[in-house]
Amino acid sequence: MKKILLLILLVLCSLPITSQVLVSGHIIDDEMKPISSVIVKRMRHKMLNYTMSDNNGIFSINAEIGDTLNFSILGFESQQIAVKRYSKPLTIKMKSGAISLEEVYVKSDKVHERGDTVSYLVSAFANSNDKSIGDVIAKIPGFDVDKTSGKIFYGGKPISKFYIEGLDMLGGKYGVATNTLPQGEVGTVEVMRRHQPIRVLEDFTFTDDAAINIKMKDGAKSHWVTSWKMAGGYGNNTSGYGKGDKELWQLEGFGLRLKPKFQTMLTYKTNNTGLDISRESTSLYNFDESFDLQPKDFIALSSPAVSAIGREHSLFNRSHAATINVLNKLNEDTQINFQLVYNNEHAKAWGQYNTTYIRPNENKVISNSKSWNEENNSLYALLKYEHNAAKSYLRNSLSGNMKWLSERLSETGTNQHFQCANIPVFDFKDNLYAIHRIGKTLLFLYSNNSIQNRPQYLDVDSTICQTLTQRFYSTDTYGKSGWKLGHFSLSMKIGIKGMLRYLNASANGLPDSLGVSTGKSHFGYIRFYATPQVEILMNDFKLTISTPFENAYYKYSMNNGKKRFSISPLVNLMWDVTSRISMSVNGNFTVSPVDFNRFYESYIMQDYLTLNQGYKGYDVEKMKTLGYVINYRNALKGTHLSASVTRQISEIPYTTMQKFIGNYIIWGITPQKTQNNSWQSTLTFQQGFRWMRGKFSLRGIYNHSEANVLQNSQLVQSEYNMLNTTASLIISPYRNMVLSYLLRYSYRDMQNECSDDKTAFCNWQHELSIVVPINKFRLSIYGDYYHNKIAVGQYKDVFMGNCKFNLNLKHIDSELKVNNIFNKKTYAYSIVANMMTMQNITALRGREIMLSLIYKP
């Protein structure tokens, strides 16, 4: 081993570490006057990075020996020089190349590719049917948009940043802009692949993330961009399970003001038509969270609402949402953000649940009708300061997230109960991130601190009462240093994670025979960790080797503490085969941290049926993972392909435990070693059709997993398979005419030792829509057809027909819409999970008619 380490050291020392040089100088014209805004590109088969000359014609750029620098600006001939070992600043003299043009007609291309930046002309993809910028992005090859939340995917991965005119005003809560920003005010959508948002890291680290920049039309920068929508109607929302609102309303208001140094966006939305507007203001990306530091909610009532069908069909709601976003750019490098989000939602759902718990001897069957009611108020506030310069970076954000959630669930049938739950959350955070560059050295400081209070309360039939008091304090603070040595980037991160949780749980009314129902405890840990990492970037290859290790001390108040040392090495190799094709292979061995959420002394009720039992062991899961990813992107031809295969082998020191005692089901874990093998593969393919103004999409995910459950002291092994596929086609054979079709298939199965036969369910969904323009009128006909297997040899079919009639005028669009024409009232489906099969029937919104007026400036 010593010989190998010595050999590696000798190789590293022998490699050239001075191949990177700082090229600087000034650019002048024929009259020896400085030229500003000259684009200086560093090229080696492709553009690697670029800069621009300042007002005095001065420029500087990091390059490597053998690169080529290209100097270009409109009106002058381009210049090229080879990078050598320069010892003094350069003088670049640009020759005049102005050309007199007469009667020239310039037409912008649909797609323009420049290095890692791809620009899409919005007007080339949009038509009069599109209202928001999200409607247009969803039709561009390579993109997927979740219309419920506004989340955007590019190449199968969520975007890492959402900019408007180069500024990040919205942060992770950009969904409201996706679904509301009028597409007619947007000029282009830019995709920046391999985007590094922190300037000081541009030459040090490699990223495969993609970001979006929304570029507005010139006219949209000189006034408030506004839009309004008002709608009213009537609904036949009465079924055998429950009753919803008959009088319907919808109101949306949007305002955006863009100034060179000031951006403001205001929104207000309210409806009772089944639109889940609260999801638009959730955080769609957050890379600063330590997910192993998140406490859980112990109390959870099971809603009869389903995700298998669009929530606009099954959500009975009264919702209000308001957002305020303000950005003030203090100078070229510094900005301040303020964000305020308020949501109020009252939701109802009704349904029938038939649940079968698989057991070795005799299955347990529960058949209940459910009536569910939820009232949720949430308030989120953020104040963020960010300084993003070439040699230093500083960001500090203060945030508060408060939620007041109350739920009511009434059940009749096998078990008749009425349950009330209050689950508030009060979460306050401070996040600091600082980077400073000294020559070829980077210094980092990161600190994320959180204080949370999560009191929870459950009442069952006014006879059983579960109360919890949970206070939580956490910190994740580290320092890091990085060095650039030729093709090598070396870094070392050293930090500390700390957590302290106080938990007081009490369940009054449970039978004494169950065991302890009251407990008061606290749990804490301190974890010292270090992460040495080396990145080797040579031509089109990037190799990352990282070996995180930590020394931790865990302490539960009811037993002795435990020290643990662990190491989790990771290797990742990325290869840009061509400018269009990239591949990566990664492997890692991961030792999970101790899960503090499982440390508690007494039984804790999740609902009237389910009790959770704590576990006081410090053993942890160990996982080996090997993955392969291939990507192909050709934006000019509209072709995007991404495929991956991942293999995981987990060694788990405990086994899930399930006990049936009287009317209760108790879940927990017990110290018995098991192994879990799993496979997962994904495929995303999109092909644009320029001649039909459309695209074809194919998405699929397959997962195979194993699980072990100790059921009343008998070990039961199970295997699960899951397949989800979606194929869609959208074309526009004639101006403003749109044809779209979607086919979605899902499959779930379960096989275990309790049954010789495999339990399997599948679901088919077809969506078809036709939009026919007639002068200023537009007729839209669309429908959803569901074909679900709910039992052996039994299927349930549901067809949801809808139509719209639009009249488009200069500033006002009117819309007459009829949903669920055939007045379908229920939706049925079945699933398998955790040694259970569930057959569910949920109430749907009945026939509805709505008249809308949409104002556009």
Image (tube, rainbow, N blue to C red):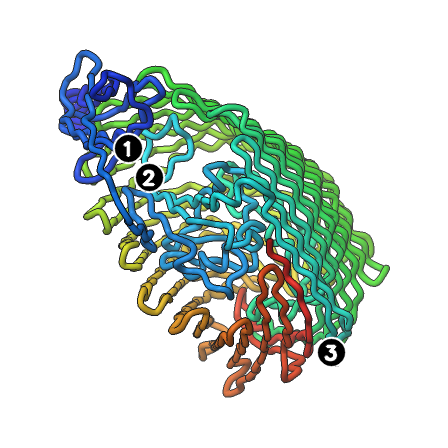
Q: Which residue has dot 1 on it?
A: 49
Which secondary structure lies at badge 2?
strand
Quarter location, residue 318: bottom right
Q: Is residue 328 above or below residue 625?
A: above
Q: CA distance from mark 1 to mark 2?
A: 28 Å
Query: Where in the figure is residue 702, as x and y percent of width and height?
Result: 39, 64
Q: CA distance from mark 3 to mark 1?
A: 60 Å
Q: Amino acid at mark 3?
A: Asn
Q: Which residue has dot 3 on it?
A: 236
Q: Is residue 130 above or below residue 837?
A: above
Q: Which residue has dot 2 on it?
A: 570
Q: Is residue 169 left or right of residue 2?
A: right
Query: Where in the figure is residue 346, as x and y percent of width and height?
Result: 74, 59
User: Crowdedness of circle 3 by 10 Å Cα count: few (<14), some, many (20+)?
Assistant: some
Q: Are marks 1 and 2 in contact (CB under 8 Å)?
A: no
Q: Nearer the viewer, residue 468 or 78?
A: 78
Q: Residue at x 30, y 26 (%)?
A: 490
For the N terminus, the image quarter is top left
Specify whether residue 361 is in view. yes
User: Crowdedness of circle 1 by 10 Å Cα count: few (<14), some, many (20+)?
Assistant: some
Q: Amino acid at mark 1?
A: Asn
User: Crowdedness of circle 2 by 10 Å Cα count: few (<14), some, many (20+)?
Assistant: some
Q: Is residue 202 above or below residue 411?
A: above
Point out the frontmost of discs 1 and 2: 1
Which secondary structure lies at badge 3?
loop
Q: Residue at x 17, y 12 (%)?
A: 87
Q: CA distance from mark 2 to mark 3?
A: 57 Å
Query: Where in the figure is residue 30, as x and y percent of width and height?
Result: 20, 21
